[in-house]
Amino acid sequence: MRYGLLYTFLILIAVVIVVIIFATVGFNKVVSKFWEVGPVGFLTYLSASIIIVLLPTIGWWLILHSHEIKSSFLHTTIGQLMGNAISYITPSMYIGGEPVKSYYIGTLYNTSKTKVFSTAIFGKFQELVSLLIFIYAGTIVMIIEAQEVQLPKGIWTALLVVDIFLGLIVLLSLRSIIKNSPLLSNIVLWFGRKGIFTRFMENLSPKIIKTENLIYQAFRHNWRAGAIAFIFSFISIAVVFIRPAIFFYFLYQKNIFSLTEIAVIFTLSQVLLVIQITPGCIGTFEGGMIGIFALVGIDAVDAVSYLLVCRFVDLLFTGSGIYLAIHYNLVNFISPRIETVTSTAEIEAPNNFTK
């Protein structure tokens, strides 16, 4: 109940912020800019957004098959959409939907949910590494062209903190994988030894150890499939990098951004998405992006017109994922229990799961 009230409050705050932004800028002006982009511009932007979602899905599908989980591409896509939707509406840096899609695939194909979960985490890790590469590349470009960018000191500080934070996550994960030294289970065991929720930690640690072992196996299982999946994730983030330039190309009928300006938009927008407070970063993302676009010479009306298209496309994907979660009775399955089933103890799939 407490978390439900907090979540509702955050959504209301986000909606109020968005309404204030549109009222201040002028909704009619924004709509007129939208029409200037035209159907070709919108469809091109939509196609780029589909590619961004589709490529990691292909990567996950390849990883699943390398583990002898013969999920069809359609079911893999359904799982990915549901997982993305849950991650999107959860203020958790776009992480959180992996258990949902693991439960869906694991139940549908009568296989270990923990094993599926390990492949989902593998895919998410590849996305994070790809994202980090582009963030670091964008940061380097911004540092080299610091005189051109002229960012406030507070933005440089936030960028440095995010770079270090994401870098530490990746480095600790890589250390855990390369040395097969589980990180989370060691933390749980440490809490148990210190007498902090001892019984809970003792019950929890075997499950975490097994999950981390399966994640380790997923990383080292098939390097060829993993490398191909990584390429798909990398290209997906590359499309994210250039996506704002696609919209403004059709708005102005020419490319108005230099590489440095594209790097500024991408890198700082990712900083906003890391610091999620409201579901989908609604409100805070809009306000922040208006400021970011102002740094590269885009006025508020044009920035909000971009955000209108951006959020409409987000709504299409998120709405589809939520609809599928409701259809498969997974809408309340936000924090499912990850478990392993033996090969002889198969789970009966719900009646509305159709192979």
Image: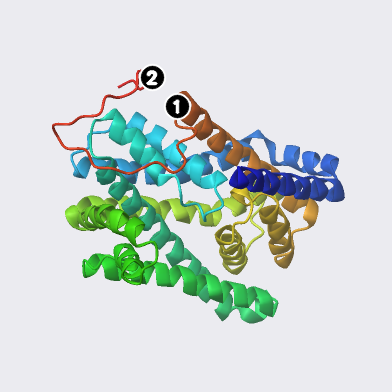
| Crowding at mark 1 (Cα within 10 Å: few <14, some 14-19, many 20+) | few
Q: Position of residue 116 (x, y in %)?
A: 28, 43
Note whether 145 is above or below 67 in the view shown: below
Q: Which residue is mark 2?
A: 352
Residue 329 numbered tag:
1
Q: How is the image coloured?
A: rainbow
- What residue appears at the point 66 percent right and 44 percent down from the top-left corner? 5
Q: Position of residue 42 (x, y in %)?
A: 63, 38
How far separated are the C-alphas under marks 1 and 2?
A: 9 Å
Left or right: residue 51 compared with residue 35: left
Residue closest to the far left: 344
- Identify the image quadrant of the C terminus: top left
Left or right: residue 86 compared with residue 147: left
Note whether 220 is above or below 6 in the view shown: below
Helix or strand or loop: what does disc 1 sit on? Answer: loop
- What residue appears at the point 70 percent right and 51 percent down from the top-left corner? 283
Q: Quadrant of residue 333?
A: top left
Helix or strand or loop: what does disc 2 sit on? Answer: loop
Tag 2: residue type?
Asn
Tag 1: residue type?
Asn
Residue closest to the far top: 351
Please report contact status of discs 1 and 2: CB closer than 8 Å, yes or no.
yes
Q: Position of residue 313 (x, y in %)?
A: 60, 39
| Crowding at mark 2 (Cα within 10 Å: few <14, some 14-19, many 20+) | few
